[in-house]
Image (cartoon, rainbow, N blue to C red):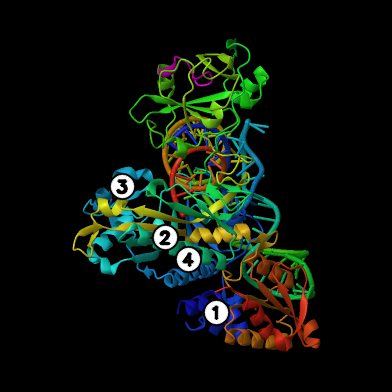
Amino acid sequence: MLVHERRMIGGARRAVQHPSARIAGCLPPDSPKLMRLSAYPVNSTKETPAEAEVLSHQLMLRAGLIRRLAAGIYSWLPFGLRTLKKVETIIREEMDRAGALEILMPAIQPAELWQESGRWEQYGPELLRVKDRQKRDYVFGPTHEEVVTDIARRELRSYRQLPVNFYQLQTKFRDEVRPRFGVMRGREFIMKDAYSFHLDQASLNEGYAAMYTAYSRMFTRMGLDFRVVMADSGAIGGNRSQEFQVLAESGEDAIAVSDGDDFAANIELAAAVPPTEPRAAPGGALRQVATPGMKTIAALSDFLKMPVQQCLKTLLVEGSEGGVVALLLRGDHELNAVKAQKLAGVASPLRMASAEQVKAATGSEPGSLGPKGLSCPIYADHAALAMANFSCGANVVDAHLVDVNWERDLPAPTAADLRNVVAGDPSPSGKGKIRIVRGIEVGHIFQLGSKYSSAMNATVLDEAGKAVTMLMGCYGIGVTRIVAAAIEQHHDERGIIWPESLAPFHVVLIPLNLQKSARVRERADALYAQLGAAGIEVLYDDRDARPGVKFAEAELLGIPHRIVLGERGLEAGTCEYRHRPATDNQDIPLADSVGFIQARLALLPR
RNA sequence: CGGGGCAUGGCGCAGUCUGGUAGCGCAUCUGCUUUGGGAGCAGAGGGUCGCAGGUUCAAAUCCUGCUGCCCCGACCA
């Protein structure tokens, strides 16, 4: 109906020109595979919108897949939505195959549930809180552990009903500090979240493994190059956890992979192997030198003419019971906050000490801090503890100590793993060296254990009739993010190159000069119908546009297969085929074209 | 949240320093020509210059406040 109205207002001319387009504009619901471009109002642009930083975002805007409504909030236009639905379908198929049950939970959730789990206080400003007209508190769900656990404790009563895995595809809202990169890090986004419930750990392990398999299958079907990496479980909590990372330069996560085996871990978690070589012998005696204005390791290294590896970095962070804790690193290493905040006595989440706290603890200022003479707890990274004859701050403004040695000049502090691994470090797996790659997190699987089930008293009766707290797993996928991740991995200078399983259409049919040539129009119309009848999703570019425009837009949009019909080929009874990544055409007999495309699509993994 | 930047037709930008007629490219509409790689010519429509105050004879331009957006650092699917 709406389509008719639009045509009457804006599309009258086109509708008169192509009577069949009126039908195409409102294809019956059982023919969602076809589309005439003349009936489709979305624009593509040559120019890149200024707001887009990363390639996937630029291409999504240029191709008309999405439009921004507010920071981190996007509308999905028809082409984008078609791909989004492909992603959702693959996810549903694999979740169903793994035995999970689809449900749909509310986006708006009462505050009471969040108070019960303790996250009303814990979650912070990322949680969007709203009030209804009665001034009652609600949240717009950023995740659904509370709701699903509430369902489980009401519905699940017997061990006989376990294990069970509930999943949903649903809109989430997280008021991200910094939304960016389009739908890659939106505030509103679609997530597939699944939650499994188990009687015991063995069953949880099985359920977790089943999700691992399902995730691997879906990302493979989506044509994504991904790695499964060990991960920190973060704010959601729990024990074992792995991330599915799509490898891409623009990824926000750093991943440590071994070149010797299949070890892969998020850099937050990747263990730094302590050095095996013994510490060098102490050399010259400890002395203090004036280092006016040298506040950074780089400046100090320059000034002292010592390599940064010889300079000790001292960071003061807040302690869990007040006070501060000193963390020592080799000058060229970076502090790993996730590791540090797990140390006994260190506040979690990690906070750097304030200027006042630094002054109180050391009598000095950042830039001149060192471990000698400190009375607060001190942790030293393994690599820092392996240093000899090093320099460090003197806890006196504009002064540093040089030729410092552990044991000789000050007691060796507690050893800990505090740093990010760097390229070239030995792999924690014992084989090979670490390489750092970047990834986009598209999936994350956790073993939650009893974190929520015990907080919310979700129990079932076991064989002996005794109430047992269920164990839970939870499994997320960033559905909208996948679309961006796929583009990050599959594009060229002309536009998107969709993996076939995600493409909004399989084939784009481009007739040339169909306004002039009755023969072209007739053959193109016929081929359009045949392709559709064969179950192939085809986009028919029946617009009165110049060939260059049609080619450029088809390539921007990333349709995998292209068929061009022109007078030239029709003389010889052929049409032209081109695979999106290819650079030249292939003539195929018009009569074989449907079979030709079908043969190519048959290669799709299912 | 801290730091930086931007805000001018649908999009991309100039004009702001030095106050005085709002301009360019793309897109859109009409006509003609063109039709194998984002056409050419001619014409047309469309902007209270983010909002609110202030200074001034006069503000896109100067001042103040606010809002929105983008980028850089601590969070996550």
Q: Which residues are magenta?
A: A361-371
Q: Residues within 10 Å of mark 2 (few under 14, many from 20)?
A: many
Image position, residue B20 (x, y; %): 62, 40
Q: Judge if badges 4 and 2 mark residues of a common chain.
A: yes
- Residue at 54 percent across and 66 percent down: it is A80
Q: Badge 4 is on which residue? A: A214
Q: Badge 2 is on which residue? A: A208
Cα–Cα gap, marks 3 and 2: 24 Å
Based on the picture, tell me whether residue A565 belongs to the magenta stretch.
no
Q: Residues within 10 Å of mark 1 (few under 14, many from 20)?
A: some
The mark that comes first in sequence, 3 or 2, is 3
Cα–Cα gap, marks 4 and 3: 29 Å
Cα–Cα gap, marks 1 and 3: 45 Å
Looking at the rendered structure, the secondary structure element under dot 2 is helix
Numbered mark located on residue A33 in the image:
1
Q: Amino acid at mark 3?
A: Arg
Q: Amino acid at mark 4?
A: Ala
Q: Badge 3 is on which residue? A: A119
Q: Quadrant of residue A211?
A: bottom left
Q: Amino acid at mark 2?
A: Tyr
Looking at the rendered structure, the secondary structure element under dot 3 is helix
Image position, residue A376 (x, y; %): 40, 21
Looking at the rendered structure, the secondary structure element under dot 1 is loop
Cα–Cα gap, marks 4 and 2: 10 Å
Q: Amino acid at mark 1?
A: Lys
The chain letter under disc 4 is: A
Q: How many marks?
A: 4
The chain letter under disc 3 is: A
Cα–Cα gap, marks 2 and 1: 36 Å
